[in-house]
Structures are given as structure tokens and as C-alpha cells.
Image (cartoon, rainbow, N blue to C red):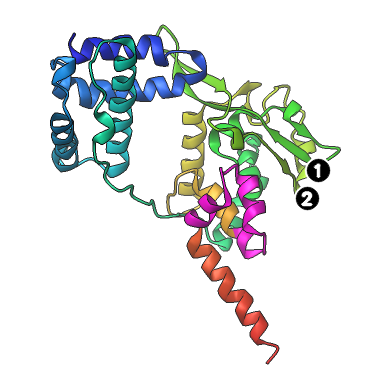
Amino acid sequence: MLYKEWLNIWLENYIKPTSKQRTYLRYAELAQLHIVPRLGTCEMDELTVDALQKFVNRLLLCGNIKTHKGLSSNTVCSIINVLQNSLKSATYAGYSQNYVADKVKRPPKEEKEIACFTLEEQKVIERAVQNSPKKKLYGIVLCFYTGLRIGELLALTWSDIDLNKGVMHVTKSCHDGKDEYGKYIKVVESPKTRSSKRDIPLPKQLVPQLKSIMKSGCEYVVSSKGQGVSVRSYQRSFDLLLKRLNIAHRGFHALRHTFATRALECGMDVKTLSEVLGHRSPTLTLDRYAHSVSEHKKDMMNRLGKLL
């Protein structure tokens, strides 16, 4: 059997369930763009460690289809995930004799620079949102003070928020998908990890503000014209807001990074922050926000030094 034939079987029968739709779409994209053109016509048992490693090395050197430059380490690692998962399944299903893809050497992952807004920029954005007639923009303020991911924000319904107790229940996420006709749709599903399901205590100052936007006639907290908002549309609204305010462009995820940075600056301990963010462990939080933690430590030590 050719590898491209097995990839189709694997994607349709091993990855396709709705609960894994995002994974399916990502794996299918990587397979079509990078794996099938180079390895698709290989017989299953021709995919030796040497052949797979040469393929990975070529991706790092000139794997970008448009520019012919190397792909990022993180993208290559995602492609290796497709190779390993599909070939392991092929071995279990009897379509391949030996599983060797686990011997492929991965490139070191690249740590993305943490981009966040300054306190002054944050205040400018908050004022603009509060003064805007577009109530859907309030989700931006909500992210500044809860650290929600964009998918979690746009999947949030009023039933997820207990305004009496001041607690938000994060139980789902969403992303943009396509229906059978190729039309973009909003896909709501369970979070990727168990730790992503969490309860976030709301700052008491947010509660009256949330009550004031509750009369939207829509189950979703972030809505427009009585309908939930897609990820693509909300990102576009965020980009336009930054442009109008003459604030340097940053991705929507910068709101989450800003929340984490402000929380550390206010003295929140890393374990609590980790739980609020929905990280697997405080170690991940420490690794990601090491610079912010370092600045916080320096400030604490200087405070202590005032006793001299």
C-alpha cells in the first residue's frame, strides 16, 4: 500500500470523530501540503528511519512551499506528529511491518517571544471598549482580567457565569470550521486538555459590567446582532481596534499574556496563576513567564531592601 492511501484511511477512520475535528483539520492540512507530495508514493515499508530523517531535514532546510525557505521547528514537529501517529496506527493495523518513526530526531522547539500590552496601552484599550457602542468588544476587557483564550471567550455562554457567586466556568472552546458545503461555521467542543476546564473567580469590578451587557438576547456572552461571533471575525475586530487607537499590532493571544504579566506584577503566586490560565502545571507557567517572574522577584527584593 502506498503511504498516501494509508494516510487517507487513517485520517478518515482514526482522527475524524467530531471531538477531534480541529486535530483532523490540522493533520489533513499538513499531510496534503508537506507529506503527500514528498512521501505519498512510497510503499509503507520504504519509510525507513533514514528516509524519514532526510525528509525532516529537508523540511528544515527548504520546506516552505511559497518561499522555499526552511519551516519553523514547531511546524516540523507537528509534521513529525502526523508521521509518528499515522505509522504507529499502520503497524497496529497490519499495514506496516515495523514502527520506526519514533527514532526520528526532532528539532528543538522555538520559544515564541511573549508579546503583551503595556499598562498604559491596556488602559487606552479598556477606555475605548467601554465607550464603544459595540458591546461585543467587551470580551477584550474580559480577557484582560481572566486570561481566557479567544476560543474559550467566544464559546462562553451566560449559563457559564454565576454572577451571584462571581465565578466563571470554562467548559468548552470553539474554532472556525467548514460545513459540507465549504461554508465557515463556528465549531464548539470540549477543551484540548483536562486542565483547560476550570473555574475562574471574577474580579468583583467585572460583575456589574457583565450584568449591564447581559440583555443581548443571545446565549453567548460575546455576540453581535443576536448571534455568536466567529474567531476570524473577532480577531478582525480586535485588529481594527488597535489600528484605530494607533497601538502596535499584536495577536489576540497578547491579551492572555498581558493578564499573566499583570497578575505576576500584582503578586499572584505562580500556582494560582497556572490554575487560572488552565496550564497543565506551574512549571509550564514558570517557563513561559520566566522574564515576568524575574522582574517580580527583583521588585520584591528591592522592597525587602528598604528595611536597611
Tell me where residue 25 appears, x and y as whole percent: 38, 21
Tell me where residue 250 appears, x and y as whole percent: 44, 49
Q: SS of the residue at dot 1? A: helix
Name the kind of residue labelled 2 in the image: Gln
**Looking at this view, is 273 or 183 the one in front?**
273
Residue range corresponding to the magenta coloring? 262-288
Point 50% across, 44% down: residue: 253
Left or right of residue 199: residue 293: left
- Circle 2 residue: 205
- Circle 1 residue: 208
Name the kind of residue labelled 1 in the image: Pro
Point 29% across, 32% down: residue: 102
The Cα atoms of the two marked residues, 1 and 2, are separated by: 7 Å
In the rendered image, which quarter is residue 134 located in?
A: top right
Q: Magenta span has 276?
A: yes
Q: Are marks 1 and 2 in contact (CB under 8 Å)?
A: yes
Mark 2 crowdedness (10 Å alpha carbons): few <14, some 14-19, many ≥20 = few
Point 45% across, 48% down: residue: 243
